[in-house]
Image: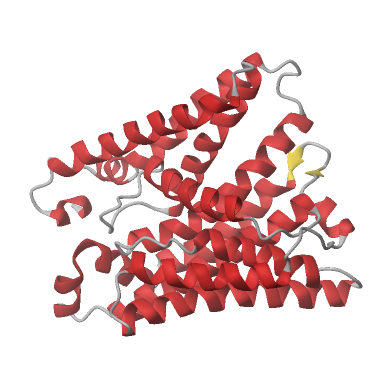
Amino acid sequence: MTEWRYWLAEQRGTLIALGIFIFMFAIYITNHPAGLTPNVAQTASNKATLLALVAMAQALVVITAGIDLSIGSIFVLTNCLASWLVQGTPAETAFGIVLVLSVGLLCGTVNGLIVLFGRLQPIVATIGTGAVYFGIALMLRPLPGGSVNETLADAMTGKLLGVVPTSLVFLLAIVLLIWVPFSRSVAGRAAYAAGSSEQSAYMSGVPIRRGKLAAYALSGLLAGTGGLFLTFFTYSGEASTASASTYTLFSIAAVVLGGVSLYGGKGSIIGAIFGAFAFRTIGDLMFVFDLDALWQPLFQGVILLAAISFGSIGLLRVRNRLEWFR
């Protein structure tokens, strides 16, 4: 297989997610009354970035052949915490941001430690930790409220040079600062190896525990980043069960749509980002065509089933799971 064909095979899921997003967004823009304006792009980008950050967090765990059902709870917890801490002077705001992201990192690390040393299935462990995280969020914000540094919030959800959505630049920075170093590190390769065949990787001397713990920790950090961005977007915090459940479910859908294998060992958060963008565009299309909101779960379910079916067909053609990496 030539180099470009190998690259194409490796990036197939990401490219498909990108194609789906471009197709759906083109339909959205074509039928939008205002067309593609900076304000329309800004609004779409801000909403998509929220889901993209949570999908990135889920993708890191899925790559290790796990599922994190506490993602939405970490997202909500850090949103509530940010509504208390990210305000005041620039120094106080910066300190609050560090604390919020540290809590997200800590939550992800706790998940990883329980999975690794408690020897529990990820789905079971994260159901329990998710309930704890949401309970803390509810203690912080029994009722919606709080505030945030409005100058920073406006800058993070606004436009650069009056045209480029800041949220897209922020998302690109996250990819460059977190995903690129992780994917090229020993821990990143170990995470992929754990998802492909943990026993074989362990017998080969791959640092499985380090890779999986790093994946869970960074997952919590990204979910915390999403909660922080939600605070910038809403100027408040809320311990919402609906938000926690919805973003957890949608993160899994975006990951699948982005070509990340639920069996682990294949995919990237780049695909998860495009999967999130495509999945989020469904709601925009519903708005443009003035369809009843009750139809939205149906369309989301159809797209998700199609994505899972496509991935299953590819999996059935693989005789050896390591063929994903050939």
Residue 187, x across and y down, in percent: 37, 74
Residue at (41% x, 64% y) in the render: 183
Q: Quadrant of the N terminus?
A: top left
Judged from this view, the residue extending furthest toward the right is 89
Residue at (18% x, 52% y) in the render: 326
Residue at (35% x, 41% y) in the render: 13
Residue 35, x across and y down, in percent: 71, 19
Front position in the image: 262 or 164? 262
Place residue 189 in its image quadrant.
bottom left
Judged from this view, the residue extending furthest toward the bottom is 117
Q: For residue 177, say whether it is visible.
A: no
Residue 265, x across and y down, in percent: 28, 59
Question: Compared with residue 325, is residue 302 higher up or lower down, i.e. above or below?
Answer: above
Residue 128, x across and y down, in percent: 44, 71
Q: For residue 100, say whether it is visible.
A: yes
Question: Compared with residue 26, is residue 51 higher up or lower down, i.e. above or below?
Answer: below
Q: Is residue 85 left or right of residue 201?
A: right
Residue at (20% x, 70% y) in the render: 198
Question: Compared with residue 4, is residue 239 higher up or lower down, i.e. above or below?
Answer: below
Q: How many marks?
A: 0
Judged from this view, the residue extending furthest toward the left is 319
Q: Is residue 58 left or right of residue 277?
A: left
Front position in the image: 301 or 196? 301
Instruction: State the colouring used for the structure image.
Output: secondary structure
Q: Is residue 124 left or right of residue 140?
A: left
Front position in the image: 231 or 24? 231
